[in-house]
Amino acid sequence: MGKSNYYNNIAPIYDQTRWMTESVAEEVADFIIALVDANPKTSFLEPGVGTGLNVLPLVRRGYSVTGIDISQEMLNQFSQKLHKIPQNLKLIQTDASQLPFSDASFDVVLTVHMVHTVSNWKAFLDEIDRVLKPRGFYLNAQWITPPARMEFERYFRAILAKYEGVQISQRNNAVIEEINVEDYFHGKGYCSNYVIAKKWMVSNTVDQLIGFFKSRAYGLCWRVSDEIFYRIMEEFEEFCADHYGSLATELSSEAKFEIWVYTAS
Ligand SMILES: C[S@@+](CC[C@H](N)C(=O)[O-])C[C@H]1O[C@@H](n2cnc3c(N)ncnc32)[C@H](O)[C@@H]1O
């Protein structure tokens, strides 16, 4: 299944199966505004904007925001959060590796959980460099998965790996080029700085997390056929009941919103 299809499929359940909340997004927006010393004319671009979780607070504060995404369904979810699309927001369905903007168009380009999803990532980073204004900011961010959820996912992956068999050995033969955003931008003369915009606690019951996996909310759930996925979930649910003692067990741990800040020197 291609990337855009996968996100089209999960768009309606994207927000509820992630761990970013509106109030966290508000605080992160304040942090970003201070970080880039934004003024009312500052323009933001988020390629892979998805359902708008990260930039909605910037839109509400009146900043000029452009969001692009390859998935129309993700953009539709974003639009549905607004009574009507305000003048300071533009949403465009397009591929991030060919941005439909002139050179030096934006003061800030923000990507969140994004670069790794673009197959032609070098072309994408070239595009970010091209559309950024001189002395602009590129913010490469992610909300780091809370450790308890990371561990939960590891258990799922272990069972998935048993069933993937042939598919895994095929993948191992492929040459996968590592994505190194930092090297790329340093090579272009940018300076970088790492900051954590926000830390917050995330809690879910085991049962809830199993429900998220059952709804195939994550890319790794699409790597096998429906029939195999059903068998994996049966085995995983049994494992969880045994390992966590009860499906009602609450898993709590800390998430972080991290940002690599790139500025042209
Ligand atoms: C993991 S989601 C992140 C969404 C949003 N940035 C967030 O933090 O919630 C990745 C997003 O990138 C989009 N995407 C993936 N490849 C893309 C591409 N080549 N061009 C544009 N968007 C792309 C997907 O459709 C999806 O909405």
Image (cartoon, rainbow, N blue to C red):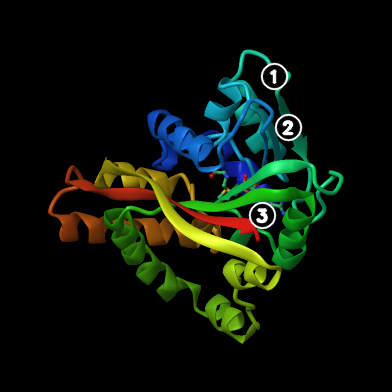
Mark 3–mark 2 Cα distance, whole angstroms, equals 19 Å
Determine the residue positioned at 70% across, 23% down.
88
Question: Tags 2 and 1 in contact by the CB under 8 Å rule?
Answer: yes
Above or below 41: residue 112: below
Determine the residue positioned at 68% across, 68% down.
189
* Nearer the observer, 122 or 192: 192
- Determine which residue is flagged by label 1: 85
- Determine which residue is flagged by label 3: 3
Residue type marked 1: Ile
Q: Secondary structure at mark 2?
A: strand
Local crowd size for mark 3, using a 10 Å CA cut-off: few (<14), some (14–19), many (≥20): some
* Nearer the observer, 21 or 172: 21
Residue type marked 2: Leu
Q: Position of residue 223 (x, y in %)?
A: 55, 63
Q: Specify which label sits upstream in the sequence, 3 or 2.
A: 3
Residue 238 in which image quadrant = bottom left
Q: Is mark 3 within 8 Å of ligand 1?
A: yes
Q: Position of residue 55 (x, y in %)?
A: 57, 34
Local crowd size for mark 1, using a 10 Å CA cut-off: few (<14), some (14–19), many (≥20): some
Q: Secondary structure at mark 3?
A: helix
For the image shown, how many numbered marks are present on the structure?
Answer: 3
- Determine which residue is flagged by label 2: 91
Determine the residue positioned at 28% across, 49% down.
254
